Amino acid sequence: MKTQIKNKSETGEGPALLSLKRKWPDKLRVIFRSVIKVKGALWGGIFVLLMILSAIGAQWISPYGPNAQDIVNRFAGPSIKHLLGTDYLGRDILSRIIYGSRIAVIVAFGAVSLSSIVGVFLGVMGGYNEGKKIDYFIIWLFDIVRSFPQIILALAIVAVMGPSLFNVVLALAFTAFPFYGRVARAQTLSVKEADYVKAAEAMGLKPLTIILRHITPNILAPVIVCLGMDMATMIIWVSGLSFLGLGVRPPTASWGTMLRNGYKYIQTSVWMLLWPALAIAVAMIAFSLFSEGLRIALDPKEWER
Amino acid sequence: MSEPLLEVSNLTLNYNLGSRKIRALDKVSFSLNRGEVLGVAGESGCGKSTLGLAIIRLLPRVAEIKRGEIIFEGTDLLKLSEEQMDRNIRGRKVTMIFQNPQNALNPVFRIETQMMDILRIQNKHKLSGTRKRRRDFKQEAIERLKVTGIADPEARISNYPFEFSGGMKQRVMIGMALSSGTSLLLADEATTSLDVTIEAQINRLITDLASQYGTSVLYISHNLGVLSEVADHIMIMYAGRVFEMGRTDDVFGSPRHPYSAALLKSLPGRRTRRNRLLSISGFVPPLDRLPPGCSFHPRCHFAKEMCRQKQTPPLIEVSKGHWSACLLDQKRGRQKWQWI
Amino acid sequence: MAVDLIQIKNLKAYFFQGKGILSKIFGQGLKIIHAVDGINLNIKKGRTFGLVGESGSGKSTLGNTIFRLVEPLEGEILFQGSDVVKMNQTELRKFRQKAQLIFQDQFGCLNPRMSSGQIIAEPLMMHHGQQKSQQEIAQDVADLLRAVNLDPEASVKFPHELSGGQARRIGVARAIALNPDFIVADEPTSGLDISTAATILNLMQDLQEKMDITYLWISHNMNQVRYMSDDMAVMYLGKVVETGPTGEVFDQRAHPYTRALISAVPQVFPGKKKETIFLEGEIPSPINPPSGCRFRTRCPQVFKRCEEEEPPLIDLGGEHFCACHLHDR
């Protein structure tokens, strides 16, 4: 009685037709076209790319080493020899900013990805199991961490674990994950009521598949927006920690330590303060814009056909 | 009784979306008499909602009216300034009710507050008499709720919107819409989100208003059944044009346009089971890429060569008070639209 | 000939409101929403069973309860002899292969981040993922798309690129992917234009004939239920007030609610003015349903007994039942 709907397809069907989704090169082109329509996102992307490139290729592009001293030209203003001037030890500021981007990139990407992955995972878990014990436990964890002022918590962690780059990343990630967790959990609560999640349940999919395939991709948009803002915050914090002497140890070049050193001479040599501050500001804006581009790239609805 | 209240002639309207120009309304002409209900039917994207918004001039900024007039009580609404529209027309002589009553009421204010706000605005520009007081406004609000059939209005008026059901909210919206001078009510899918028994109540309320107070109603709906019960006249739209217009019994009883006939045939009405419904092939064409000739011809079962080539067919009075825009019908005399 | 595919016996599903600590402190107490309150239905194999009722009648909850998306409080759902309510996770997964759900919101039931092809392939992957290659599954998806009259190239499109009718077809294709015996269609044409709705109705009928599917057709549209279904039930506030063969129910209209509901359905009858029975008032809240007969607060023929005792389903002969004291003599 039961006829299967099969073998109806005519022969000669080229296998090229039988794809479930768009081919990658085609898809990439579509995504790229959509992202560059938002001008800011394009610029943000370019600056982020520049930062990453300068972090990777610091030794080749910077005119001097980060700690090479030109004692004669201490406190120099911008000149042909030192494009952005030199600091109190006669070190080239441009080179130090380029080397400093390493720290910024490592911390921003490291701390943000760590905290967002952990936060989103816990948030989705909690949201999906709303009202169960595990949810209460996760909320409780978020609340405990969030009840400490973030910078003080980070300070305490670094102070206990010792000042090193790795510990700074860890400490910053630890203070930030409840933030992502909260966002992810709230989104999950609304997405899990969507009909397509119910449809997946009615289909008999396992909870993990539902979480990974149906819930997580659909809660990411606000998380990504937070991500961009947070990367900028992280750079400031690592600067702040370095400023307090708990971040990266001198003489390692980082924008924060440069700020700290610069502010002592603010009245005599403003360049020492101005350039690292500008670098931080540009990085902040770039990351925010970049995250907007990322959000568009991940959302099929924003793609141009 | 047949003095026209609203006369729309040759209304043509574009939406300018960047490089694309979408013709949402194309030479729409009709007239509406006092105390009558005109039903506007059509599928989504046919321009029926745009028509309602154009009359009350609440179009989005991208809309541009190219041609045409909207004569309401002797004045062309398109020539009035925004201020004049606000002062005399919108919310006073012409009011509109929308599909979702739940979105139209602010959830944090009492019904009382919201109704009295409207009343105060409606009274502000009136020249007659002294300024009304709060108590009077409240009394009037209660009166209006009573007219719209809400039981125990004195108590219910101090409730919040969430305490009202969908049908009751739509009654409140109608109550707010009806100021004493309202002569035209635009109802855009006003009962679509309601249950059938509630829908019947609201439709009775609207038709009662038309017959008792002489309010004219432009009733926009995709539900042909509702229209056939409510409306005196029917206008069928497709891709921004009027395809057929006439008295309800004429249009639904003996449709002259194949599109109207096809719509009626695709309803699962009295037809028996296992008797396939007629389905119109294809889709409503995108409005910026309309086919030449009759815009319905790619989907029309009866399309002939002339439908493809000729200019867009005009709306012609095929019998008394019955207009149709089908070339076949006009050129070859009355057609019987029979699908095999 | 007509074997029962699904038997629902005394099914109850309640929602609880105000379980939290705050409402306990402020003494609001537990609110029980009687969404589905003792339903008995028999759905015959290969037929369409229409379920009508207004919003709040519990018809959608009933559909969800059959899939245990809502856990029933008590009662039995016998599917081919085994009780869905008692199934464990493995059995439930098998059951959900044979029974499928089509949701009301044609876009809402499709994951916006998956292409149509991926959406349709998902149940196939889950159940045949081990045996079949990617290529075979892609072939199956193309066949399914053809079966619902869509171009196989539609598989690369995302839901927001589809029209309402196309999105609905994708939903149907996903539902028939695993050759189900039973499909619950919850308002499958809501939000669609007239002509699109007609094509969906035709499509679903064709599929029923081809694949021998049983439908539970949930709708508020009386015309549609009359057209589609062989048997039907009318629900009001979580209870079945009338059930029987569709023709019988429409001809006899034994329950006053059925009568009012059918008369209120707008019909295109040129020239004829039909008599509409207007029901006064609104549907009462399912939190505190009226005592006795639930319809008594709006019933035009109410009398004293309606308040005191709840009418049972009375056999009117020919598998036609009605829960009204008027028929009890």
Image (tube, grey):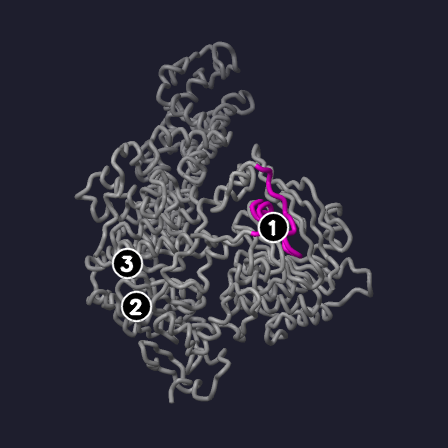
Q: Which residue is denoted by mark 1 in the rendering?
A: B324
Q: Are dots 1 and 2 in contact, CB under 8 Å?
A: no
- Residue C104, relative to residue B289: is it above or below? below
Q: Is residue C311 in the magenta section?
A: no
For the C terminus of chain A, the image quarter is: top left
Q: Which residue is denoted by mark 3 in the rendering?
A: C213
| Residue A59, position as x, y percentages in the image | 35, 16
Q: Is residue B104 visible?
A: yes
Residue, x 40% and y 59% (percent of image)? C187
The range drawn in magenta is: B310-334
Q: Mark 3: which amino acid?
A: Ile
SS at circle 1: strand
> Badge 1: few (under 14), some or many (20 or more) residues near its Cα, within 10 Å?
many
Q: CA distance from mark 3 to mark 2?
A: 25 Å
Q: Residue furthest front?
A: B332
Residue, x 28% and y 60% (percent of image)? C182
**For residue A277, side relative to residue C318 (left or right):** right
